[in-house]
Amino acid sequence: MPIYETLSDRLTVVLDIGAAYTKFGFSGEYAPRCIIRSEVRCKKTNQVRRIFDFKDEQDLYDLLVDFIHTLYFKYALFSPKDKPIVVVESLLSPTLFRETLAKVLFVHYEISMMLIVPSHLVSLSTLGAETALVLDVGYIEAVAIPVCFGLPVIHAWQALPLGAQAIHNNLRTLLSSENTGINQLPETVIEDIKVRCCFVTKQKRAEQFNLAKPDITFAPEVKYPIGGSDIITISGKVREKVYEILYDEDNDHLSLSTMILDAILKVDMHLRNQLAENILLIGGSVMAPGFKARLKDELHKQLKYERYKKLRIKTFKFHSPPCKENYAAWLGGGIYGATEVLGMKALTREKYFLENRLPDWPNMRDNRTL
Amino acid sequence: MSYIVSPDVVKYACTCGLLKPISCLYFCRYCCELRCGFCVCHEVDSHFCGKCCENLPSSEARLKKNRCGNCYICPCCQQELSTRIGSKGPSNPEDPKSTPKKMYYLSCLYCRWSSRDVGIPDQGAATGGWPERENVHANRLQEVIEGYKAFITAQRQQKEREKKKQRGKFISYTDRTGVTAAALRKRIGLPAEVPNTYYRNRPKPPEVAIAREEVEDFPEDLLTKALNLMEITTIDQRLLQPDLQPTTVDKLFPIHKQLSIKRSLRCRSCEHNVSKPEYNPNSVKFKIQLFAYYHIPEVRIVTVEPLRAGKTAELILKFTNPTQHQTVITFLPLDLTDKGGDGDREVVGETQSLNLPEKQPPSLGGQPSSLLSLSSRQPSITIKPRPIRQATNCSIAIPGSKVILPPRDDAAEYDDSGETHNIQDDTKLVVWRKSNKAFVKLAVTPDDGLELNTEIVAGFTMQHIYTNTIATTVENKEPDRHDHNVRVFLSLGNLVGSE
Amino acid sequence: MSRNSIKILPGALVCEESKLRGDITIGAGTIIHPSATILAEAGPIIIGDCCLIEEQAKIIHRLPFDEQDTEKTPVLIIGAHNVFEVDCHVESPKIGNCNVFESKCFVGNKVTVTNGCTVGAGCKVTEEQILKENVIIFGEKCQMREGLDRPGLQTLQMETLSKVLPNYHHIRKPNKKN
């Protein structure tokens, strides 16, 4: 570590609270210090509760107080008081959540300033790029937002509830048809089955799934022990089919691939090719084996349809960020936090208490200058 | 001790409005108020390693990324690894004099993982020397970070220059969109080339990453090869090493143990510590420990008659005076609207605007954070207490007379010579007493019309005389005595049916 | 369960306070602590050489519930160098060599244990399966992993025990010749 960093007292926490996992670390570092589940143990009932399962604002406030306490005193190991923080969040983050988070940080933890950066935009900084189409496949939803010249094109955003949660539910359904007692399994076990056994299959094989007599042999089955008292069988069919939910078109003919293309469609004509040749995939779900190869095939398949022919896109190019995809947004926040942007654009405590609100892009008051 | 951690049947209302058992509460002697973990300010006191108990100064801890240099945890099950000796044959087998060389390896006693499992060579020294892994993207990331830093600095300097020129042409944008001037310029179609020093001296932006058409191929193996679950890491094992996230067990490497901290707690209103541990990690003692348990009379439920709706039952409570001073307990009806009796405290809430304390330096707004942290500690903001949510469904007949509790005398515990006190008790109220304890009989009546098995909660305000021993001035030798009110909630059990 | 026939080979150290029922053969060098329980209900038990069976350990040879009516009398063969730690409960129908059953673990009667396996403290394994060689079961959720080699032998501990135990306990005499 360079000497000037040790001398200055500057330690900026970068926080990315996801629906399933929270990424937490310091600005200027290459990887988060920890990636932990966004959940806290309730002191009264001694049960683990997800932060996003909050009941009301008061409940969320208490959950966040407990959660941020763990982050600071178990992982960061320094007092949050009078220190700055960078928060990475999606542009579609619920207002209640971000305002409560700001309240917890400013009122309860008395941080000095807070810089909120949009996850899609900052992810690009890991590439040094200014224009790309960013698809974030998270836990609850997948969100595609094109970023052009460092400016998120918000009107082109696409979101579908295609994330880890949908995959987990699908896996539960598929497993239930072959095994008993799946519904009692906690989600962590389902997640573990997904991570260790399942993969995104190839397009040609996926087309066979829907035929009456599939002309393929499925991948070998896996015996998965649950504790010491049970073993469930995960058939090859289940292993291959779980992720299909991301690529199967729903009733509105929407899927992950159409999201990307629809987002491109909504952008100015001469930027389209540039976006198609700069696709950045982030979020934990894109790390599944075979995900990218399949997405590329699906995109090409969609291009043949009338709806997207007018795009006249020939190639799709994908970026590989210098990190694991599940913390790409965090890393972007870390790069921003390392610069002087923090002092220039962060919301200070004084300003927060003066106005008693958080600037937000849908608010015209904050967008007046645009 | 089991009483303290047992189900909390007696709860005290903290000043912040949360209900907690007395073992979880603090008592700030300076404000004479109850405090709890929620309403005090937590601070990191000292860093130490939980395995080797070594104390680290905070700067060193920061340098080591909050991890111990010598201790490792198992990447497989997260338990601590121990160093084991495995002897290796003599370095020169022909020479009978050469002794077997001692070699060290790391081993987990819990899941039997060892550093040999992943092919880490044994080390000649017991401590350290284990290979450290670098982030593979370190160079690229360093370049990107430096690039952005230079870019933003240049932008800021330019902004300052513009300000000096008083042109005010520079448009500022919101934090949310993160728009840079350059981006907007491109967007609205202005030429990027501006006759301006900033753009001429513009720092070189980091090299843009190139997107590629080819992506990771589909791993064909998955379709044919049987999966060995034992070779694939779980998600917890992966996330333990965020930068590597190994997918197979042969890439699990030992992880430096995360440091632990000792925390001190500070009262938010008066900035005094309510709890401060000793520095030495081996010590479990405190330098300052203002636990409520040592200052507030403790209430315990001794017996309660079966509770029936609308019927009066007898409740016996035990009061213990933990202090060295005599106190008098008065029973008052529970008042949930009362905020603890001090009206002049600064309160903060959603509706009220905040008044920050006056002492702050005025020019904080635009200062970079480094300057801010150098300035002295800022006074805390007081949070508005919450209304108490606990409802009571049982009335307590508030006795008119008071209970005197003598001071605690540790020697009295061993004194068998009988009671020496001559306190004139209201015999209807005080059933029995010994040294600093008194057993008090109260009449409770659960509300009419309650369902069977409803949990009965009763509450009252306990007023006790608190003797403050902090001498405020030298002349004032007389300890300060005043009344202190605590709201106490008793969970008396469930309602039973009629006889 | 009427007849007790305990055969102890020379070199074995069997404390008198141990509870042995049924037809049991104990190999040379095996140490059985006081208050260890070995019940041969379904058929004879043959314990190999140099096994260590600690206090409160239970080795029960019992047929699975669905096979109890049959007339079979299978033999439970326990290999050499197995360690049964304090308060483990093993009902396995077959046990190979060099296995470690840690404290308070439970191994059901459908689990066949091969060689070099470790069943971690507190782990409860009941589902019908054959544990592969060098498998380690550990943790609350009975995670499994494959070890590089067999767990180390408890030679030092056994040497100490063979010196100390006779000083404080009555030892059963070996009643069989090699």
Image (tube, helix red, strand yellow):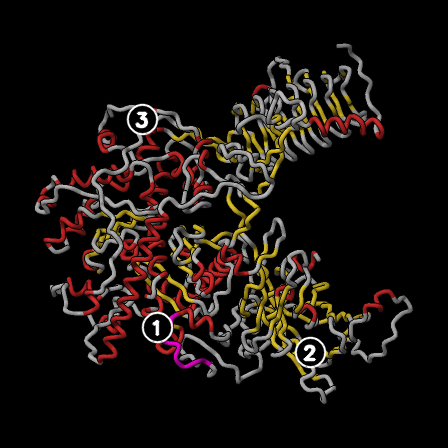
Q: For mark 2, give the secondary structure.
A: strand
> What is the three-letter code of the residue carrying label 3?
Phe
Q: Is residue A352 magenta?
A: no
Q: Are marks 3 and 2 in contact (CB under 8 Å)?
A: no
Residue that label 3 marks:
A218
- x, y percent for residue B59: 52, 60
Residue for point 30% across, 59% down: B148
Residue A367 lies, in percent from the top left, at 23, 70
Please provide percent x and percent y for residue B97.
67, 25
Q: Quadrant of the N terminus of chain C?
A: top right
Asked whether residue B308 is in view, the answer is: no
Image: magenta residue range: B360-368
Q: Decide: marks 2, 1 in contact (CB < 8 A)?
A: no
**Residue bearing mark 2:** B464
Q: Is residue B364 magenta?
A: yes
Residue that label 1 marks: A357
